[in-house]
Image: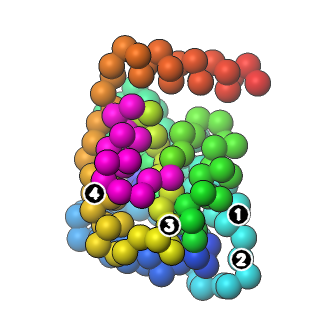
Amino acid sequence: MIYLGADHGGFELKSKIKRFLDSLGYEYEDKGNMEYDKDDDYPEYAFAVAEAVGKRDDPSRAWKDRSKGILLCRSAGGVVVAANKVRGVSAIAVSDVKSAKHSREHNDANVIGLSGDWMTEEQAMHVVKVWLETEFSHDERHVRRIKMIREYEEND
């Protein structure tokens, strides 16, 4: 399942991503905001998506079968900071195909943040597609580093 969330800064782009996911046959759940509100606060939607992903994701499964999240705000930075406060979430702000691919191959990111201000619809769709189709590399050094992060998270 893909969980989506956006504040006013990413609301329009989130709507376009939903149509794109429909066209590709992906299942998703929109965690808000459900209507445009120029005064809403991104942490609310970031936490909702991150909690859904953190509770349901199983890194031992193939990526296509895992829970994942797509968050949007003006910069992508705020939603990523908030999402990373939730146990079991590895959120990365991605700005292009290279960073989307890297976030999966090297970091096993289960949530991405996209900028509603700095990405075109075409860029966002390309980034989302590449991110959804990229498996974690399982290279020993990446596995070791992710394990270190998870152990720190568990002992915090």
Spatial distance from mark 2 to mark 1, Cα to Cα?
8 Å
Amino acid type, residue under disc 2 in the picture: Asp
Spatial distance from mark 2 to mark 3, Cα to Cα?
16 Å
Residue 115's label in the rendered image is 3
Residue 103's label in the rendered image is none
Between disc 1 and disc 4, the foreground one is 4
Q: Secondary structure at mark 4?
A: helix
Residue 40's label in the rendered image is 2
Instruction: Check contact, mark 3 vs mark 1: CB within 8 A.
Output: no
Between disc 2 and disc 3, the foreground one is 3
Q: Secondary structure at mark 2?
A: loop
Tally the numbered discs: 4
Magenta-drawn segment: 93-106
Spatial distance from mark 3 to mark 1, Cα to Cα?
17 Å
Q: Residues within 10 Å of mark 1 (few under 14, many from 20)?
A: some
Residue that mark 4 sits on: 129
Q: Earlier in the sequence, mark 4 or mark 3?
A: 3
Dividing the image into 4 quarters, which one contains the C terminus?
A: top right
Amino acid type, residue under disc 1 in the picture: Glu
Residue 94 is a magenta residue: yes
Instruction: Please state the horizontal and vertical placement of residue 59, each as a whole percent of the image.
Output: 43, 30
Amino acid type, residue under disc 3 in the picture: Ser
Residue that mark 1 sits on: 44
Instruction: Return the residue found at the far right.
Output: 156
Q: Quadrant of residue 21?
A: bottom left
- Residue 12 relative to residue 154: left or right: left
Q: Earlier in the sequence, mark 2 or mark 4?
A: 2
Residue 76 is a magenta residue: no
